[in-house]
Image (cartoon, rainbow, N blue to C red):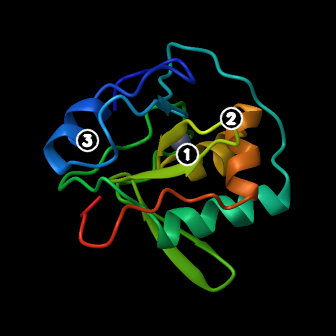
Amino acid sequence: MPYRHDLSPHPYFEAISRIKGWPPPGTAALTVGWLAPEHDFPTALPDDAFVDALFSLCAHHSVMRVRSYYGCLLPHATRPAAPYVVRRGGEEARLGSAEIGVVAASGELLLAPNLVFHYVEGHHYQPPEIFIEAVLARRIIVPPAGVPF
Ligand SMILES: [Zn+2]
């Protein structure tokens, strides 16, 4: 996944919305957590409630799936193989081949690679507050019935 500065326009979303017919073209969709080793990112120890909510999104609401897996390129003592399988509360999530999407309080769609869970848990990446709030509020992007997303 190429680097994108947090809260940049999503590079593929406009084309996807035109193909799928949803959401309406012109809907603001911003990136979160498109990290790369050559770009610094803010860090903080994550709050447990946020990690729980983020895990639930990754485990149950991943969207925009692709057939390949993206691995984490950030520094590791021992690099885990993709797909990353993470567990929390007796559940499992496979990371690296989809995104998660939430709706900001201000209405923008916020899309992050589901590797964001690993970035937060393993690298203490601190996403923008607008994303943390939307995840904690569990404002998940829900397409209309019949629209694959
Ligand atoms: Zn990593």
Q: Which of the two residues, 144 or 41, is positioned nearer the viewer here?
A: 144
What secondary structure is found at the residue carrying circle 2? loop
Residue 41 visible from this viewpoint: yes
Element on which disc 1 rests: helix
Mark carried by residue 127: 2
**Mark in the foreground, 3 or 2:** 3
Residue drawn at point x = 68 percent, y = 54 percent: 135
Quarter residue 95 falls in: bottom left
Hey, what amino acid is under mark 2?
A: Pro
Q: Would you say 53 lies left or right of 19 here?
A: right
Number of other residues with Cα within 10 Å of mark 3, as a class: few under 14, some 14 to 19, many 20 or more: some
Labelled disc at residue 17: 3
Q: Earlier in the sequence, mark 3 or mark 1?
A: 3
Nearest to N terminus: mark 3 or mark 2: 3
Left or right: residue 48 versus residue 62 is right
Spot occupied by residue 131 in the image (x, y as percentages of width and height): 67, 40
Give the image quarter of residue 63.
bottom left
**Horizontal and vertical percent position of residue 77:** 57, 40
Q: Would you place residue 141 above or below residue 78 in this image?
A: below
- Residue 56 screen position, x and y as percent: 60, 69
Q: Quadrant of the N terminus?
A: top left
Residue extending furthest toward the left? 19
Residue name at image x 42 percent, y 61 percent: 62
The amino acid sitting under disc 3 is Ser
Which disc, if any, is residue 30?
A: none
Residue displayed at 22% across by 53% down: 66
Question: Where is residue 122 drawn, in percent x and y?
Answer: 65, 47
Asked whether the residues under the numbered discs 3 and 1 touch, taking CB atoms below 8 Å apart as contact, a structural biologist would say no
Q: Are marks 1 and 2 in contact (CB under 8 Å)?
A: yes
Name which residue type carries label 1. Answer: Val
- In the image, 133 versus 46, the foreground residue is 133
Between 82 and 44, which is closer to the camera in this rendering? 44
